[in-house]
Image (spheres, rainbow, N blue to C red):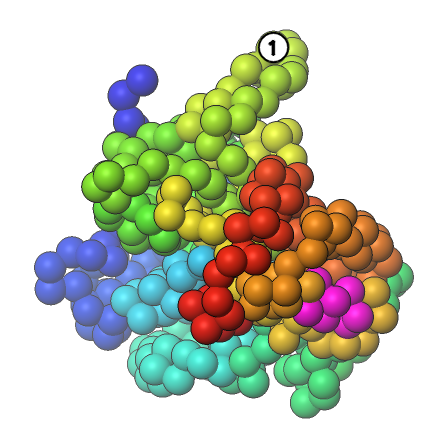
Amino acid sequence: MPVPEQRRIIFRHIDEPGYTNDIACYLRNGGYEVMKRAFTRPPQELIDEVKKSGLRGRGGAGFPCGVKWGLVDRKSGKPIYLIVNADESEPGTFKDRYIIHQDPHQLIEGTMISCFANNVQQAYIYIRGEFPHGARILERAIQEAREHNFVGKNILGTAYSCEIYVHRGAGAYICGEETGLIESLEGKRAYPRIKPPFFPAVLGVYQCPTIVNNVETLCHVKYIAEVGGEAFAKIGTPNNTGTRIFCVSGHVQRPGYYEFETGKVTLGQLLNDVCGGPLPGRKFKAVIPGGSSAKIMRFGERYKGKRKAGTEMVDYDWGVEDVPMDFDSLAMIGTMGGSGGVIVMDDSVNMVEALANINAFYSHESCGQCTPCREGSLWMKRITTRMVHANAREEDAALLKSVADQIPGRTICAFGEACSWPTQSFVQKFGDEFKAYYETKKTRPADALPLV
């Protein structure tokens, strides 16, 4: 099957020679024209366009953007806030920071259109603390937009006013979770909030209705306002509309970021045809399709079942390379599209040692609020660290699975799933390596092992 051409919406101009991140260049390429037209339309009409588009959030969960907007409490009389989630701390994901560095005004335009549609008068861009250069770029871009009356008081001569502020986080993975982000924005420790009520649409920042959208998602809103919801819904596949940016890292010849219509490219096409295939003399062994918290896929396994095609249910029989890269297809085979971070591992990788690195990360990043997550992530780290330092035991695979199985569904936020899914899937898919690790490491000196 031929590889589809990249359909660039977000990256339409981003790599053009001479394209810069200042407002003069953005205006020369049609910048803020969509916003000007959007501000002449009724706000509810813009919300309806986003609902018709079928746009799903690009931050990880894939929740429909229009539905999220529809859940906002508009009857309380409290001000509505919008927060741009630019924390991007999922390992293997690097698309949002590239948008910020190369085309920040696209984000600002999409944010302002979203603010106008939802009667938001104050918005925040919450950016990860490790992105100081990105924060400076955003500060400058907002000032440029303010000078051109695209942000601030009486925007474009209307009665509508809205300010955008950049808020730098402290560099914690948990701040990517919506309510943890809100707690951090309010100056508190980033402990995710207990639900109900539905957060943050009812009680978000400052106990007011709040919309939290990802950087890539808001850039899509700008395009939806430009072409209309129905036209956007024709891009991609049903229930997986628009384009997705895939961040491919690891053992491929051409790692990078690639934008395709959602569901129109398979994993095999992405890795082999677009990214050049495995490194010379190597073979693909495993891939994580949606950031490090997504369950791993093992090359050589097959997935069988039924899927919806139009109005009918049809059989599917896929190898790993046949899987379409969309939210629903990846969910059907037991993993997820997540944040679009595709992490590739070849046959040089030891899966026990790879899991040890992942477990070390999640143990470090747990906020500690929930006992199953705080203790479970630490136990999993201790087990895999002990294993790679020449102290593996025959029962370690079963022990790891037992610990991981006690975490999901028992925590306030989804971090419990995020830290347990890698262990569950690694042990399930590569149980043979975990069982063999005890024998293979008995003769290997501890000083020859990787530090975790």
- Residue closest to the far right: 196
Identified by mark 1, the residue type is: Val
- Tell me what residue is drawn at x 25 percent, y 44 percent: 279
Q: Position of residue 344 (x, y in %)?
A: 41, 46
Residue in the foreground of this view, choosing between 111 and 128: 128
Quadrant location, the N terminus: top left
- Residue closest to the far front: 443
Q: Which residue is mark 1?
A: 314
- Tell me what residue is drawn at x 51 percent, y 58 percent: 443
- Residue closest to the far bottom: 187
Residue in the foreground of this view, choosing between 34 and 364: 364
Instruction: Tell me if residue 236 is in the magenta stretch.
Output: no
Q: Left or right: 424 with respect to 321?
A: right
Is disc 1 surrounded by few (<14), some (14 to 19) or many (20+) residues within 10 Å?
few
Q: Left or right: 431 with respect to 448?
A: right
- Tell me what residue is drawn at x 41 percent, y 79 percent: 131
Q: Left or right: 104 with respect to 48?
A: left
Q: Of helix, strand and loop, which mostly describes the magenta segment?
A: helix
In the image, residue 233 sits, relative to residue 163, either above or below, namely: above
Residue in the foreground of this view, choosing between 446 and 87: 446
- Tell me what residue is drawn at x 24 percent, y 48 percent: 254
Q: Position of residue 380 (x, y in %)?
A: 70, 63
Q: Left or right: 323 with respect to 145?
A: right
Q: Is residue 144 visible?
A: yes
SS class, disc 1:
strand
Instruction: Tell me if residue 381 is in the magenta stretch.
Output: yes
Q: Position of residue 16 (x, y in %)?
A: 16, 56
The residue stretch that appears in magenta: 374-382
Q: Position of residue 202 (x, y in %)?
A: 80, 65
In the image, residue 149 sits, relative to residue 442, either above or below, namely: below
In the image, residue 108 sits, relative to residue 41, either above or below, namely: below
